[in-house]
Amino acid sequence: MTDREISIKSRFEAYLVQYGEEKLCLAGRLHEDFLREFPRPLLPELSLERYALGKSKTGSFSWWLEYNTLPLGSIRGGTAIKHVIFYSAKEAAWKYPEPFRSPEDAWKRLRADLIRLIEEHDGNDAEGVDDDSPLNGKDMLKGKVLFLYHPDKFLPVYKLEHLHQFLEELDVPPSEWQGRDNISCNLRLKEVFHGFAREGFGDEGASQIWAHAGAAAIAVAIKDFLYSQFTHEEKYYKIAPGEGAALWPECLAGGYISIGWNEMGDLRQYPDYDEFKSAFLKHDFHDNVSANTRKANELWSFYNLKPGDYVIANKGMSQIVGVGRVNEKGYAFREDLSTFQHVVYVDWEKSFDPPLPIAKQSYWGMTTMKEVTHKNYVEWIAGGDGTAQQGKGSDKPPMPAPEPFPFQAPPEGKIPLQWPVAETFTAEEERFFVRLEKSLERKGQCILYGPPGTGKTFLARKFIRWKYIKDKLLTQADAMTANVWIMVTSPRFEFRWQDILNNGSAQEFNVRAVQRNYRRARPGDKVLCYQSGKGAGEATGFVGIAEVAGYLDEARDVLPIKGARAFANPIPYDIVKTIPEYQQTQAGKMGNRGTLFEATADFAAWVKNYLADNDDREAARLLEGVTSKRIHSELCTFHPSFNYEDFIEGFKPAPTENGQVAFCLEKGIFVRFCHQAEEHEPMPHYLIIDEINRGNVPKIFGELITLLEKDKRGVEVILPQSKERFSIPASLYIIGTMNTSDRSIKMMDAALKRRFAFIECMPDLDLLDYEIDGLGLRLKTILEEINRCLVEFGGRDKQIGHAYLMQKGEPIRTIEELKGIYELEIIPLVQEYCFDDYAKLSEIVGADFVDINNMTINSEIFQESDDIFISALVKRFQSR
């Protein structure tokens, strides 16, 4: 076991011992209650009405899964579509998947597949569910069913992002869970804890609990441990316990917070937010639709409070009477209460008598419940400086936040092997790359064009990796090359190079600028030792080579450095500062203002050659293997200010020793990259020019546009400013990208179009054939419908690409990610396409997201409960 695994195992033992028999018994009883209601042998006879939400207020199979077994892992929230079939009271109709002709047909298939799913994990050779099963995409439903019937094999953790997070925290190699579904990840996570048990617990109490508590109880304890240790999302809500806090005494005594709208009855009877909102609006509690909608959102947010959320009980607009945290009991409808019957159970941690005064919050007068910030909480409750405000506190102390795990660095001097991860390419990508390869071989350069978000730059970079792998040009040696750093010392520092270079000892170097470099340094990296002798009468320049001896100690801000060899003669700074290889390093660009800089391969090679030329071959040999790594691709972006001087060559301002400014002739990125390609022929080099159409391409390339032609490669011209001979090597290829929404390909210069091949990249909806749990819509459906409207409105160039809904090459997985992308990326882009036509914008993105009359975006919808956002999306994009 790794040090981290040992640490986590130790913490889990302590957590299990302190977990409490009451919680274990509650989990066990709740699991038994469920199995008593829905024993496995009777599942083949389970009726549709007994399964689905909506027909009865309580008691159905889906109701138990979503509302009555919350301690056994929550799947609450989102739409009722997560259960595949449900009854809509709003429409007085059954809702079920489209391929089926009736709810009965859909139920027969769903019931059979649920049984197959359970049998698949019995340990025998059961068939499992087919690819066309209505269960596919319903990962939270499958996860909870499998846990309830196989608690010995699964954990009550159902969200894929949480499973990934926990596996990563537990040091499970990514190759064992990346790209896997919820079921595979859940099984792997449970196996980690089975491994802990096989190793044996050091605490006898933990061993006894593991041996004698039921499988469901142990699984729930593991779930609670994982969430308590690795997720720390805290939300804060102000909630008024009646007008003027009239109900505060009974809320405090009863351990709950309550609000009104009793006529709605038990909120657990509504399959989802849309059904609830429809019922709320029928009651017409308030003066207008807007007020009714706002209050419906408040009540639904109250219902969705989660364990651990903070509740701030307010009195009026400028007083607080209590603070607490929602506990595991959560929501209930209390018909025994005479006034407000919707309650959420709270462990009150502070009560204030007299009430705690705060600055007036004017908006509180219009809201029963409102989310507030952590900053608000600190200012109001802790006085802004962490000290408790005056008030009478409850007996129960606040729940402490779990301590973070200490950083476990690899053993000093050991370099972790980070071999390249084997990359796979889809059949579609392979076909695209072959096409791009042929285009580059024929023309030498190609432009990938299409609407924004179609992954043009991503594909260009992936093509280069594909090409190198295909031609076996990438080796493990290339990937394992150590970094080279420039480290600067000063007479002001206690650290001295002479103390370690001559005897190979190690010392700790205090972190200074550039701080991010200290975090990136790895054991085995080479260090070029620069000594500043100003004011000390010592030589200024490079005096030797050292090595990074360990990882950064972030607690103490020190990096261990070990001496390797002092140079026979220092390399004077007066020589180094004039050479282009040094000027292109981080140190050269920053004027040595700092202590740790990244060196370039070119500068390391220059140092090695200088040492060899001056008969210091032993020191030069230490730089072997660190200068062989070459970047065979380069990325630059064209923009309106990018010009010939940036790309080819030109005079640029540079500081002089006396503080004046002089103009020096500098090679541009294209000329430098061509020289590198020339030095390493026939190794192919790729220059990616992003947003190529945003620059003035003929002006940027100048006279060199002629040399782009395939038959002109190797032909020399005289550069007008440096008077140097220059040619473009045959091994250099250019891949440009352009968004057709910015500028049509038809408007490009004819001479440029003649020299480039063009490949169109359009949205690939098949990459988005994924349904986020609780949404009931495939990402593909959302983007397909938006693009259909955009094509009708503005033409095919105005579409939105699939990359908007992807991260790291995979479809986004959570409602939170979709909310952020929809609010901050998709709506603004469509808004730009629609100009000031807010009616058209509303038609494309959804009526609930746009206020047509005021010509604004309803940004509040993104701050409310996820269910409200989901309801707005479903209303816009669901066909049935």
Image (cartoon, rainbow, N blue to C red):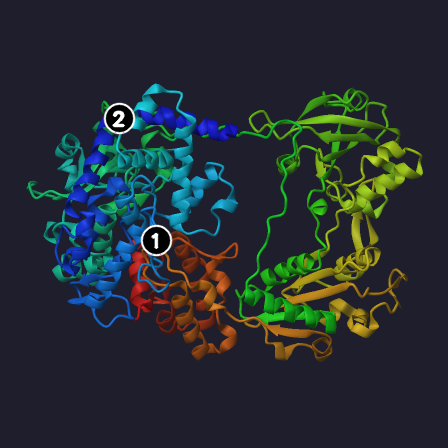
Q: Residues within 10 Å of mark 1 (few under 14, many from 20)?
A: many
User: Left of 837 or right of it: where is 742?
Assistant: right
Q: Earlier in the sequence, mark 1 or mark 2?
A: 2
Type of amino acid under label 2: Gly
Spot occupied by residue 276 in the image (x, y as percentages of width and height): 19, 57
Type of amino acid under label 1: Asp
User: Left of 855 or right of it: where is 746?
Assistant: right
What distance separates the C-alpha of mark 1 from that of mark 2?
31 Å
Task: Look at the image and tell me in which quarter the C terminus lies.
Answer: bottom left
Spot occupied by residue 672 in the image (x, y as percentages of width and height): 79, 56
Residue beneath disc 1: 139
- Of residues 809 and 3, the one nearer the viewer is 3
Residue in view at x 59 percent, y 60 percent: 458
- Of residues 308 and 880, the one nearer the viewer is 880
Determine if residue 714 is in view.
yes
Marks 1 and 2 close (CB-CB < 8 Å) = no
Residue beneath disc 2: 20
Determine if residue 365 is in view.
no
What kind of element bears circle 2?
A: loop
Spot occupied by residue 121 in the image (x, y as percentages of width and height): 33, 48
- Of residues 278 and 368, the one nearer the viewer is 278
- Of residues 374 and 709, the one nearer the viewer is 709
Residue in view at x 27 percent, y 27 percent: 212
What kind of element bears circle 1?
A: helix
Residue in view at x 93 percent, y 34 percent: 615
